[in-house]
Amino acid sequence: MSTTLIIAIIVVAVIGYVIMVYNGLVRSRQMVEEAWSGIDVQLKRRADLIPNLVETVKGYASHEKDTLREVTEMRTRAQAVPAGDIAGRAAAEGMLGAALGKLMAVAEAYPDLKANENFRDLQGTLDKVESELQMARRYYNGSAREMNVKVESFPSNLVANNFGFRQATYFELEDPADRQTPLVKFGD
């Protein structure tokens, strides 16, 4: 075998490897984006429930204005976070989750409200959305982990750095209490 043929085989093998790693990185980036889309859908579903929930509570607990205002403000703040700011969105959603928890605690003090069918339906829907949101977060963070492993691992990190692939941000809540699903309790 000539030296030129050996060099050509090595060059083709290296190019093939770079293409394979690049395609794997692209696949991982797409998985992260798809996973974020899943979180975004669940956050939108939750945000869409809030006005109905606030209005229902307002009818029974009108003097709980501070709690109702806080929920509304946290919803607005969460929706105002720019699309690519995952850490900012996590912080804003954590504050919204805490405000929703307070709203549910207020609801516990009003037996007529707890007995209201519309309120119970909203609670059930919120519980389902929170559960689906938790699954979406786990999927997103798993996709982010896979991407980050590829971006950091040798030798794929050489390809990642040369083609501008970056680590994905985990969707984490800062306050451990915010990691809990808001308490949704049906009747006594």
Image (cartoon, helix red, strand yellow):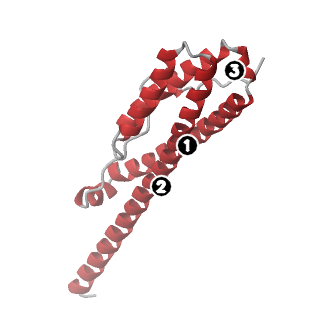
| Callout 3 crowding tier (Cα within 10 Å): few <14, some 14–19, many ≥20 | many
Three-letter amino acid code at disc 1?
Answer: Arg
Q: Which residue is mark 2?
A: 34
Q: CA distance from mark 3 to mark 1?
A: 22 Å
Q: Residue at x 34, y 52 (%)?
A: 151
Farthest residue, direction right: 188
Q: CA distance from mark 1 to mark 2?
A: 17 Å
Look at discs 2 and 3 and give the one toward the viewer.
Answer: 3
Three-letter amino acid code at disc 2?
Answer: Glu
Three-letter amino acid code at disc 3?
Answer: Leu
Q: Which residue is mark 3?
A: 113
Q: Nearer the viewer, residue 163 or 109?
A: 109
Q: CA distance from mark 2 to mark 3?
A: 38 Å
Q: Which residue is mark 1?
A: 45
Query: Along the polypeptide, which appears first: circle 1 or circle 2?
Result: 2
Q: Position of residue 165 (x, y in %)?
A: 30, 55
Q: Nearer the viewer, residue 157 or 36?
A: 36
Secondary structure state at the residue bearing disc 1 = helix
Quarter occupied by the N terminus: bottom left
* Rendered image quadrant of residue 28: bottom left
Q: Residue at x 28, y 76 (%)?
A: 10
In the displayed structure image, the side of residue 23 where residue 67 appears, left or right: right
Look at discs 1 and 2 and give the one toward the viewer.
Answer: 1
Secondary structure state at the residue bearing disc 3 = helix
Look at discs 3 and 1 and give the one toward the viewer.
Answer: 3
Circles 3 and 1 in contact, beta carbons < 8 Å: no
Q: Position of residue 51 (x, y in %)?
A: 54, 33
